[in-house]
């Protein structure tokens, strides 16, 4: 084991050190419980501050300016936020974000359902589980492409199937009322796979004795699931909840690939609208984009605060 | 075990189940199977409207051949590798250290720093977009792989630190204390005691970060443009513009772009799932 290599003699006081060195050493030695974490943390923290924390503050600041990305930023106070209030596109994006948030949560029960379906020990089940998980590993860009062909009104598989039962044709991505739901459905595909894998791991850890005891008491089916299994799956549910909320608010790739915000901007969400405003071909509006980003950030912050609070409650018991 | 093991139920239900699972799988992967079929069809099938029929000939080799030898795809793939691999190494190295510091030492602000990493990892990308793009431009790294790598390392350090710190806290603390009693220097404790025990965490994080970065699209679009530095996720859109309506080639291209993380997942499945489900079991 590693300790063997660390036999005495490797400490800082080894060898014939001069008086000066040994006094330095002992200073180091006395303070090493303080110094060591500092040194270990420095590179990571500096990097993170530089690329993540400071930019957040800069974005807040920038949201009070008018800036095209080239000239000098011009301070305009709350003007960007005032403009947001009357911006129809912003309102549409906000509503779409809400739809994403609510409908994306369907991934959690859907994932649980598939996990329960697959939680058996038959030959080949491991391969089946991995294949069910497949959509999560593929990039969202490819998922977006795959689904835009799936929805295609002329040859898409969806309309093919609808045709068999005498329905359609339906142009999901061309219809302003349907388009957001169509994209969310595409997003649910990998997200459900993720929740499934979380629950499969959770189900693996369910205490078999409790299940047997409950079975002896006559619990089964839905009752067993609700009163015995789901409470034990709480940690998995928490993680599923966190990743699904974050995923819903981060949705960008699918919208960009499948519709580019259209038709008529009806599938925009805040993350996409911000990108569009800040880096659009009609001139950069960095300040206005930053204001949109701040709104999105504040929405996200409510959830982040809740997650951190839950983690803190969990952590208090630790070392 | 829940639900009830299938072995304890009737023969009929067992057979049904065994048939149901593959059927459900085919349904689940249907959009993907469709793309796989598209990618081996000849071009003629699309012009004659034979979208869903049997391919009139097998053109898998020539379609994939054109993706590999007739387009910028190999270049995009190489860019993706050159962006992903250094990011994995950098983020894992940094977070081994931060995770060790936050997991082992007690000091004021420990939890605060930890929460800074966790919270930073959850923020929307858009709040970072304008300043990070600006920063990258100022450093002369816009449209370079280095610019992307540096940002990715910094951002991923958040998630990696969360992961590493929790992993290290679950290690037996007595080992570290024993080494301290022996007078072992702190960096040696890190290198010889803790790091060897972190191998599973390092493996899990590496595959996870590989997949995350390979699949990143947003930052690729924000920080790069053009075939000399764009990764494959961004490249596939220009690939598609080049082969508009050539569905057989677009399908083949998509499959090629999606393959590396898929291969990674199947090779390192255990680590991958261990990484993703961190915290899902107490």
Image: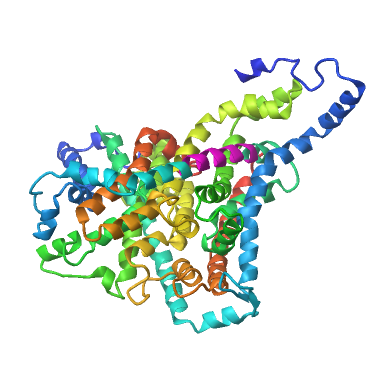
Q: Residue at x 15, y 49 (%)?
A: B41
Is the magenta region chiefly helix, strand or loop?
helix
Q: Residue at x 36, y 39 (%)?
A: A216
Q: State the image coordinates of residue B281 (x, y, percent, origin top left).
A: 48, 41
Q: Residue at x 57, y 56 (%)?
A: B136
Quarter of the image where the C terminus of chain A is located: top right
Q: State the image coordinates of residue A123 (x, y, percent, origin top left).
A: 24, 32
Specify whether residue A116 is in view: no
Q: Nearer the viewer, residue A23 or A30?
A: A23
- Is B92 magenta? The answer is yes
Residue at the outermost right position? A19
Q: Is residue A205 above or below residue B53?
A: above
Q: State the image coordinates of residue A50 (x, y, percent, origin top left).
A: 65, 53
Specify whether residue A123 is in view: yes
Left/right of residue A73 with respect to residue A189 in the rendered view: right
Query: Which colouring convention does the figure follow?
Result: rainbow
Q: Residue at x 37, y 61 (%)?
A: A254
- Is B164 magenta? The answer is no
Q: Quadrant of residue B9?
A: top left
Residue at the outermost bottom position? A86
Q: Nearer the viewer, residue A313 or B117?
A: B117
Query: Which range is magenta?
Result: B84-98
């Amino acid at each position: 084991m590693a300790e063997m290599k660390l036999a005495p003699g490797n400490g800082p006081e080894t060898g014939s050190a001069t008086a000066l060195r040994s006094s330095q050493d002992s200073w180091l030695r006395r303070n090493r419980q303080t110094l060591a974490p500092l040194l270990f943390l420095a590179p990571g923290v500096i990097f993170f501050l530089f690329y993540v924390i400071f930019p957040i503050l800069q974005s807040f600041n920038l949201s009070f300016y008018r800036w095209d990305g080239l000239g000098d930023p011009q301070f305009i106070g709350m003007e960007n936020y005032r403009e947001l209030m009357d911006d129809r596109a912003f309102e549409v994006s906000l509503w779409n974000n809400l739809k994403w948030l609510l409908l994306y949560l369907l991934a959690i029960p859907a994932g649980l359902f598939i996990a329960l379906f697959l939680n058996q020990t038959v030959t080949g089940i491991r391969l089946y589980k991995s294949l069910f998980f497949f959509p999560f590993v593929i990039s969202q860009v490819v998922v977006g492409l795959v689904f835009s062909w799936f929805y295609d009104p002329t040859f898409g598989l969806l309309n093919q199937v609808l045709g068999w039962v005498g329905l359609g044709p339906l142009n999901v991505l061309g219809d302003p009322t349907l388009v957001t739901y169509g994209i969310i459905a595409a997003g649910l595909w990998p997200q459900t796979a993720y929740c499934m894998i979380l629950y499969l791991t959770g189900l693996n850890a369910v205490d078999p004795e409790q299940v047997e005891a409950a079975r002896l008491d006559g619990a089964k089916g839905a009752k067993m699931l609700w009163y015995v299994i789901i409470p034990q799956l709480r940690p998995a549910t928490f993680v599923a909840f966190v990743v699904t909320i974050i995923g819903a608010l981060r949705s960008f790739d699918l919208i960009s690939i499948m519709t580019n915000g259209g038709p008529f901007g009806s599938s925009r969400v805040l993350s996409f609208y911000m990108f569009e405003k800040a880096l659009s071909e009609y001139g950069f509006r960095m300040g206005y984009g930053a204001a949109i980003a701040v709104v999105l950030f504040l929405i996200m912050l409510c959830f982040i605060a809740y997650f951190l609070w839950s983690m803190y409650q969990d952590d208090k018991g630790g070392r | 075990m829940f639900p009830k093991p299938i072995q304890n139920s009737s023969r009929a239900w067992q057979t049904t189940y065994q048939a149901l699972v593959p059927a459900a799988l085919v349904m689940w992967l249907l959009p993907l199977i469709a793309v796989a079929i598209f990618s081996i069809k000849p071009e003629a099938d699309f012009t004659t409207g034979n979208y869903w029929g049997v391919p009139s000939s097998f053109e898998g080799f020539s379609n994939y051949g054109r993706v590999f030898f007739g387009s910028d795809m190999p270049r995009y793939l190489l860019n993706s590798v050159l962006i992903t691999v250094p990011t994995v190494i950098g983020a894992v190295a940094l977070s081994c250290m931060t995770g060790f510091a936050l997991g082992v030492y007690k000091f004021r602000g420990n939890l605060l720093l930890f929460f800074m990493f966790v919270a930073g990892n959850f923020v929307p990308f858009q709040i970072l977009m304008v300043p990070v793009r600006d920063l990258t431009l100022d450093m002369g790294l816009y449209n370079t792989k280095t610019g992307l790598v540096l940002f990715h390392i910094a951002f991923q350090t958040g998630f990696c630190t969360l992961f590493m710190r929790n992993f290290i806290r679950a290690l037996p603390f007595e080992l570290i204390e024993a080494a301290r009693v022996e007078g072992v220097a702190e960096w040696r404790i890190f290198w010889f005691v803790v790091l060897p025990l972190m191998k599973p965490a390092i493996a899990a994080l590496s595959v996870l970060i590989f997949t995350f970065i390979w699949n990143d699209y947003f930052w690729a679009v924000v920080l790069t443009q053009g075939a000399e530095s764009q990764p494959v996720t961004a490249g596939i859109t220009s690939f598609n513009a080049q082969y508009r309506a050539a569905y057989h080639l677009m399908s083949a291209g998509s499959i090629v772009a999606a393959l590396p993380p898929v291969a990674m997942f199947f090779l390192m499945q255990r680590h991958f799932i261990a990484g993703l489900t961190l915290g899902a079991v107490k």
